[in-house]
Amino acid sequence: MSDVKPKAAHKSSSSWSDVKAKLADFDRAGLIGLVQALYAASKDNQAFLHARFGLGGDVLKSYKVTIDRWLWPDVFKNQDTSVAKAKKAISDYKKAIGQPDGLAELMVFYCERASGFSADIGFQDDTYFDALVRIFEQSLKMIAALPTTQQPALWARLTKVRCISDDFGYGVSDDMDELLAEYGVDG
């Protein structure tokens, strides 16, 4: 009997540096082929590349479709909500292109869909409402950083979200009132 224990399998922990080093070996055609394979691999990759390169009509459309699906699901089809998946759409857009006006639009859209769904079906969920208030606040911050000509329409949409949220409970409308006052928006 030997007391020698077998070596544990070496765990590979590749990083971006490793990938970058391999990419240096690619020629133009090889790199285009790789991007084409990534494009074909998933809808998320397609949305990323469309947004990054400004392709198609409305680069926000696919992100809005995702937000809408996860914040206003079809309850007759037994679909569920997912705050994480809806927020991921905003994060994915930010990684792809991250234009402040696009981020503001997606965040306001998030608030509209979340509040609309809750009001429409009487949805009451603490986590859902907490996320709504957080995105509401992030929307206000993002709008405040936009040129003043772009702000009024977005402020008005958030004020409407605040009004819709009046009957939710959980302190949602109180939190929104405080945030609107903090940013000097008439609610």
Image (spheres, rainbow, N blue to C red):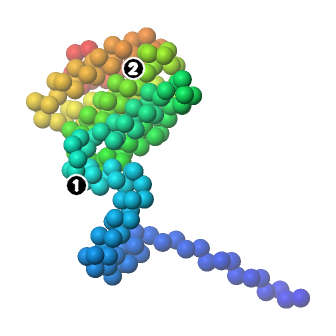
Q: Nearer the viewer, residue 66 or 3?
A: 66
- Position of residue 177 measured from the top left corner of the image (x, y, whole percent): 33, 17
Extreme residue in the top direction:
167
- Residue 138 visible in the displayed image: no
- Position of residue 187 measured from the top left corner of the image (x, y, whole percent): 26, 14
Compared to 49, does 145 lie above or below? above
The residue at which mark 1 appears reads as: 53
Question: Is 83 positioned to the left or the right of 153 in the image?
Answer: right
The N terminus: image quadrant: bottom right
Compared to 172, does 7 lie above or below? below
Q: Quadrant of residue 175?
A: top left
The label number, if any, that marks residue 75 in the structure image: none
Amino acid at pointer 1: Phe
How many labels, in total? 2
The residue at which mark 2 appears reads as: 116
Residue at 28%, 22% in the rendered image: 158
Question: Is 78 positioned to the left or the right of 119 in the image?
Answer: right
Q: Earlier in the sequence, mark 2 or mark 1?
A: 1
Q: Residues within 10 Å of mark 1 (few under 14, many from 20)?
A: few
Compared to 133, does 11 lie above or below? below
- Local secondary structure at mark 2: helix
- Position of residue 163 measured from the top left corner of the image (x, y, whole percent): 33, 13
Distance CA(mark 2)–CA(mark 1): 32 Å
Amino acid at pointer 2: Gly
Nearest to the eye among marks 2 and 1: give it: 1
- Residue 146 visible in the displayed image: yes
Q: Quadrant of residue 41?
A: bottom left
- Local secondary structure at mark 1: helix
Residue at 22%, 54% in the rendered image: 53
Question: Is 4 positioned to the left or the right of 172 in the image?
Answer: right
